[in-house]
Image (spheres, grey):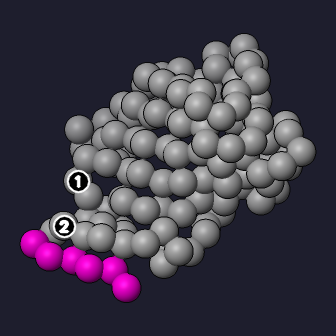
Amino acid sequence: MAIETNGASIRNIAEVPWREFPNHFGGALSKPLVMPETAQSRHLDYRISMYQPMAYVERHKHQVQEQIYHVLEGEGLMEIAGKNRVVRKHDVIFLPPGVEHAISNSGLTDLVFLVITSPVTDDKAAV
């Protein structure tokens, strides 16, 4: 059971349902652990993602958002500005605004990684 006090919260990861966000395909699932709609965060979007083999997010870029991906398990292919690199456990990827990127599971087991995004919206007018 989630605990919320004065805007602070404690929630177990098992309480948060998996979702397939727009432009994510083939079993590219995420649990939105901290974001405006789940924890009323103002600056952070924090989620854990699990991509089944061959799952992916389509190539995209953010206008103002920065992202960090931290790979916990599995193996995938990270595309950054048209260049591909295999990513695996303990790789940390930083993506500044404006850099086109995509990630896919190129391995044989689930690819599990954390995604931290700030600010929570990619709307230039909101920043």
x, y percentage for residue 91? 59, 27
x, y percentage for residue 59? 68, 33
As drawn, which residue projects farthest toward the right?
108
Q: Residue at x 40, y 31 (%)?
A: 66
Q: Is residue 25 left or right of residue 1?
A: right
Q: Nearer the viewer, residue 67 or 92?
A: 92
Q: Which residue is mark 2?
A: 8
Does label 1 or label 2 sit earlier along the sequence? Answer: 2
Q: Which residues are magenta?
A: 1-6
Indicate the quadrant where residue 5 lies. Answer: bottom left
Q: Residue at x 18, y 67 (%)?
A: 8
Q: Secondary structure at mark 1?
A: loop
Residue 79 drawn above or below residue 5: above
- Residue at mark 1 to residue at mark 2: CA–CA distance: 12 Å
Query: What amino acid is found at the position of numbered circle 1 in the picture?
Result: Arg
Q: Nearer the viewer, residue 42 or 46?
A: 46
Indicate the quadrant where residue 81 lies. Answer: top right
Q: Which residue is mark 1?
A: 42
Question: Does the segment drawn in magenta span residue 85?
Answer: no
Pick the quarter of the image with the C terminus. Answer: top left
| Residue 21 appears in the figure | no
